[in-house]
Amino acid sequence: MSLRLIEIVLPDKHRNDLEDSLKEHETLDIWQESIEAGRIHFEILVPTEQSETVLDFLEKRFSHVEGFRIILLPVQASIPRPDAGDKKKAEDEAPMEEKKPVSKIIRLSREELYSGIEKTVRTSWVYIIMILFSAVVASIGLLRNNIVFIIGAMVIAPMLGPNLALSFATTLSDAHLIRKAFKAILLGVLTAVIPAFVIGIAFEVDTTIPELIFRTEVSLGDVIVALIAGSAAAISFTSELISALIGVMVAVALLPPLVTLGMLAGAGRWELALGSLLLFLVNLICVNLAGVLTFLVQGIRPLTWWEAKKAKKAAQKAILIWTLLLAALVLMLVIS
């Protein structure tokens, strides 16, 4: 069982209120101690799928209290191990009205997800260097028709994170995170295309290379794969299956079409470069569309009801926009 440890600090006068409140939630263990300045420190061990419910309750109940602080920590191991039988018994005995749909979906809490995904949109020099390196590796792989180099470049490039961040921010209607995600995506695109464009000018680009031509063609199969990969990326991120993201990076293939676009543009083959641009746009749109839908299905929403209402409208608009853009691209593919 995956566990989380919630630490909360409050003024001592709220001790009884917090103790009574925690009885209403599924917890595995609770510890408390008095600390300096008349404050109380609680440690609450909960199943991961219940952490968001408890966090939301604590924030709503005590966020107005001066000196309030919550810290969420992942638990690598716990001895003795939690008894799954006791957990199931507790769930069966709990009143039906106290159970929330979100608890039935085993995923990380909203705050934990936000903290993790916000790191992917930091446009630092490391982000730029990693994309630059991956663009050079992908260019060499394309010129040499070497699929191993191309796959390696896909894994190196940190381009999936900003797209997941955009989907996640759209689901929460977080304008600040949306702007940061767009900035990271745009910077990543330019960082990948510009060096590839220079390589296309400096070296002869053989347009008969299979791996190169493969990334100038778009089919309905590419649309299906990109949608599945986008959903898989969202599920992997929210359920601690980070290792699965490596396979998703390869399936989505955001970087190779951009590098192909730059190289072909540098070589003056604009008609083929257009195909690479379409492939990149299909992947970009599908990843974000599938990401928003998956996050919604997993019950990710803001804390307050008015924020949730605003986020629902923003998500609906985003789904409509991504769907219309995808439909336009698919129509172009069918016509062509």
Image (cartoon, rainbow, N blue to C red):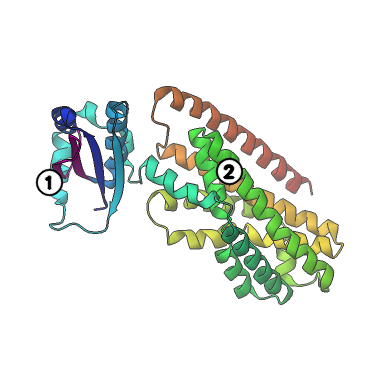
Question: Distance between the Cα atoms at labels 1 and 2?
Answer: 44 Å
Q: What percent of the width, then of the height, locates residue 130?
A: 59, 64
Which residue ends up furthest to the front in the rendered image? 37
Examine the rendered structure and indicate whether residue 134 appears above or below residue 9: below
Residue 263 in the image, given as x and y percentages of width and height: 78, 64
Q: Nearer the viewer, residue 149 or 72?
A: 72
Q: Tell me the kind of residue under disc 2.
A: Lys
Give me the residue at 43% from left, 50% from top. Answer: 116
Q: Is residue 252 visible?
A: yes
- The residue that label 2 is drawn on is 180
Tell which residue pokes out farthest to the top in this image. 306
Left or right, 312 with respect to 82, comes to right
- 267 in magenta: no
Secondary element type, mark 1: helix
The secondary element bearing badge 2 is classed as helix
Q: State the image coordinates of residue 315 (x, y, percent, origin top left).
A: 53, 32
| N-term mark: 1 or 2 | 1
Q: Give the left or right position of residue 110, taking residue 209 as reference.
A: left
Q: Amino acid at mark 1?
A: Asp
Is the magenta region chiefly helix, strand or loop? strand
Residue shown at 57%/39% (left/top)? Answer: 178
Q: Quadrant of residue 87?
A: top left
Q: Position of residue 62 (x, y in %)?
A: 27, 28
Q: Report the span colored magenta.
A: 24-45
